[in-house]
Image (cartoon, rainbow, N blue to C red):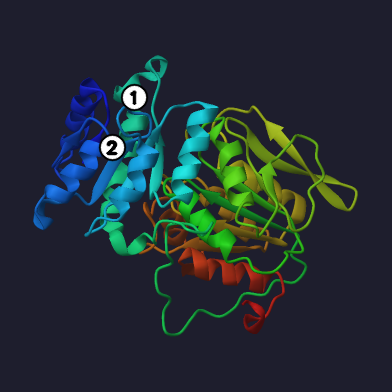
């Protein structure tokens, strides 16, 4: 279902989506009230698996409509569309806390608008990924700060814990579907970590500050965008700012963050590979790398550098990934020591930090 107050945008999105034979647009609404009414009136067999919901509309806006859409049965995955502004980013993160499955920034006319190839690839991946995940992968609308994506059930025999001697840093990389997977992982970090955590999420400038606030509100690790030259402290999460690579540099017995305007890698800035390479160069084998859901293969070469230095690499499993591109590339390269859903990855992170399995709760 498409919900946008612009008939032109609805038509353009329908053409874009239905050019993919795996996608069918079953309904179009001009505002949130129309979407709620339409969804309730459709026969169960014709109800959409995914709703693409604009946040700024007359009559009923997207934030008002969101909880009403999430009460429908069968429950759709709702992807909210927001403007590429600070206010749009803040609203998108609020929608994730309220139960939206994902978000997509609306492209500006300067970047090609809806015809931008990067936007097309992202929206197709998210629509098909969340449809594949199904409603069971999306938790109840948040009455608490817990993330919307529930963990996929773990196997009866969990993988062995991976304690690491002398761990100095943790590096996490993610892209498509990453905010929810990242929130689930962070929510599972129930003990104060003795090392800093660096995160690269492919995201536009402005959105990363709101994502940092979103993660900080979970109450597990203090989280903020990294600042150039700041000392990296244990138990804190440092998020790469949009459009800047995040690197580390040795400083005495510790490390400082360095932000770089070097060219994009894997068509991305920030990119995961340079962050992981710098961690391997600075910390040797005392690095834990974690690759979550995302398109492409950013992070694979960085994980190779971590593994060659003697570090440990973990990746998200295919079943729980919206897009198994980045973690799949790591797995297919033989670099991952375990493939797990985000909640189980959190347990492995705690184990690597020295917390035994019985101390995880």
Residue 275 in the image: x percent, y percent?
64, 44
Q: Reading the chain from its start, which is encountered first: label 1 or label 2?
A: 2
Q: Residue, x 38% and y 54% (percent of image)?
A: 324
Residue 32 disc label: 2
Crowding around mark 1 (Cα neighbors within 10 Å: few <14, some 14 to 19, many 20+) is: some
Per the image, label 2 sits on a secondary structure element best described as: helix
Crowding around mark 2 (Cα neighbors within 10 Å: few <14, some 14 to 19, many 20+) is: many
Residue 81 in the image: x percent, y percent?
37, 35
- Farthest residue to the top: give it: 110
On screen, 150 above or below 272? below
Q: Quadrant of residue 168?
A: bottom right
Which image quarter holds the C terminus?
Answer: bottom right
Q: Quadrant of residue 272?
A: top right
Q: Residue 247 versus residue 320: which sits nearer the camera?
A: 320
Per the image, label 1 sits on a secondary structure element best described as: loop
For disc 1, the marked residue is 116
- Farthest residue to the right: give it: 252
Q: Residue 284 versus residue 320: which sits nearer the camera?
A: 320
Gap in angstroms between the C-alphas marked 1 and 2 = 26 Å
Q: Residue, x 64% and y 84% (percent of image)?
A: 358
Q: Quadrant of residue 256?
A: top right
The answer to whether one can see residue 291 in this image is: no
> Is 33 positioned to the left or the right of 204 in the image?
left
Residue 264 in the image: x percent, y percent?
54, 31
Q: Residue, x 22% and y 30% (percent of image)?
A: 30
- Farthest residue to the front: give it: 59
The answer to whether one can see residue 144 in this image is: yes
Q: Residue, x 54% and y 67% (percent of image)?
A: 345
Q: Residue 102 versus residue 234: which sits nearer the camera?
A: 102
């Amino acid at each position: 279902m498409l919900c946008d107050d612009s008939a032109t945008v609805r038509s353009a999105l329908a053409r874009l989506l239905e050019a993919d034979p795996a996608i069918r647009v079953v309904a179009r609404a001009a505002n949130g009230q129309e979407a709620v009414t339409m969804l309730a009136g459709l026969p169960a067999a014709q109800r959409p698996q995914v709703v693409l919901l604009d946040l700024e509309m007359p009559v009923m806006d997207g934030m008002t409509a969101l909880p009403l859409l999430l009460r429908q049965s069968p429950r759709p995955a709702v992807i909210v569309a927001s403007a590429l502004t600070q206010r749009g980013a803040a609203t998108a993160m609020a929608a994730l806390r309220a139960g939206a499955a994902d978000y997509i920034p609306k492209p500006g006319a300067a970047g090609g608008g809806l015809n931008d190839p990067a936007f097309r690839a992202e929206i197709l991946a998210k629509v098909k990924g969340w449809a594949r995940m199904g409603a069971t992968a999306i938790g109840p609308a948040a009455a608490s700060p817990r993330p919307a994506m529930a963990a996929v059930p773990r196997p009866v025999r969990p993988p062995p814990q991976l304690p690491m001697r002398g761990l100095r840093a943790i590096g996490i990389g993610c892209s498509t579907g990453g905010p929810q997977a990242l929130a689930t992982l962070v929510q599972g970090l129930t003990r104060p970590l003795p090392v800093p955590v660096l995160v690269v999420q492919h995201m536009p400038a402005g959105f990363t500050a709101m994502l940092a606030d979103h993660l900080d509100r979970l109450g597990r690790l203090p989280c903020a965008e990294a600042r150039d030259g700041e000392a990296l402290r244990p138990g804190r999460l440092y998020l790469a700012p949009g459009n800047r690579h995040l690197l580390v540099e040795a400083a005495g017995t510790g490390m400082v963050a360095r932000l770089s305007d070097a060219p994009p890698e894997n068509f991305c800035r920030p990119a995961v590979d340079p962050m992981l390479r710098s961690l391997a160069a600075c910390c040797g084998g005392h690095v834990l790398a974690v690759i979550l859901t995302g398109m492409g293969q950013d992070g694979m070469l960085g994980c190779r550098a971590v593994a060659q230095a003697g570090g440990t690499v973990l990746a998200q499993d295919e079943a729980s990934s919206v897009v198994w591109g980045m973690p799949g590339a790591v797995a297919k390269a033989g670099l991952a020591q375990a493939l797990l859903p985000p909640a189980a990855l959190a347990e492995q992170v705690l184990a690597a930090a020295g917390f035994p399995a019985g101390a995880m709760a």
